[in-house]
Amino acid sequence: SDSHFPVPIKPSHLSLSHHYPHFFPSSSPDQSDGQKRIEFADIGCGFGGLLVTLSTMYPDTLMMGMEIRDKVTEYVKERIKALRASLGSCHNVSVIRTNSMKYLPNYFDKGQLSKMFFLFPDPHFKEKNHRRRVISDSLLDEYAYVMKVGGMVYAVTDVEELGEWMSGCLERHCLFERVGDDEVEADPVTKVLESATEEGQKVIRNGGQTFRSVFRRVAA
Ligand code: SAM
């Protein structure tokens, strides 16, 4: 249950030196004004494939994976540790075991994130479980809060109904607008959304289809 993992009472209590020692070598410099901050969040990061890929595309950007399964989180931690030691990569990447649907504002301040990823989230097919979906009207209020104006949301699924649900929620929300096809195609990030993630690779192997929503956080 949630009680098994510690949650910072506010974002400044998240230790950046613990997560990114290469960037914060001294002890416990908390997130504060003027400091480098976490900018990308991979929600339900699974085995961390996206983070590993993005780490070399954006080596100076701090990114955090959020994953609720303990063993999966431990695997990602070990993966990052190994890549740091062997290739010297992934210093800008870390992972937290948490319930992102409950605690996001404990980790990120208002307007902090420039990219949020929701890749192949659990579909929760039954109608009574739709409230558990990681994108919903009310959770988008929270995501809008932690995102900076101009920030991007990427949501991908291989479940057509969930794809429609996620883009419907984003379309309805007054603080998000759909990004045009040309811009989506030109964005280097969209090229790796499927190929970098473990779930995406499965879909590619099976010749499946994916449904993608790319939206921008706009001003109120
Ligand atoms: N994004 C990865 C990928 O594309 O390979 C993983 C996709 S997997 C189907 C969905 C992941 O979301 C699972 O690893 C699951 O444990 C995680 N998850 C589900 N609910 C979550 C929550 N409330 N907070 C954090 N992670 C969650």
Image (spheres, helix red, strand yellow):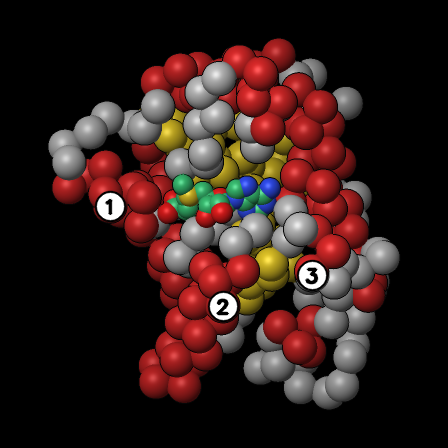
147 sits left or right of 66 in the view = right
Query: SS at mark 3?
Result: loop
Spatial CA distance of label 3 from label 1 is: 30 Å
Q: Earlier in the sequence, mark 3 or mark 1?
A: 3
What is the x, y in percent for residue 191? Answer: 30, 42
Q: Looking at the picture, how far across and down is residue 132, in whole percent?
A: 59, 28
The residue tagged 1 is 201
Residue drawn 29% across and 42% down?
A: 200
Figure check: 177 above or below 75:
above
Q: Earlier in the sequence, mark 1 or mark 2?
A: 2
Q: Which residue: 35% across, 18% down?
A: 160
| Of callouts 3 and 2, the N-terminal one | 3
Q: As rendered, which of 70 and 19 lies closer to the eye?
A: 70
Q: Please name the residue that numbered disc 2 is placed on.
A: 74
Q: Which residue matches tag 3?
A: 5
Q: Is label 1 within 8 A of ligand 1 (CB to nearest ligand atom)?
A: yes
Mark 1 packing: few (<14 Cα in 10 Å), some, or many (20+)? some
Categorize mark 3 by other alpha carbons within 10 Å: few (<14), some (14-19), many (20+).
few
Dividing the picture into quarters, in which one does residue 62 lie?
A: bottom right
Would you say 87 lies left or right of 201 here? Answer: right
Q: Amino acid at mark 1?
A: Gln
Q: Mark 2 Cα within 10 Å, few/some/many (few <14, many 20+)?
A: some
Left or right: 97 as drawn, with respect to 86 = right
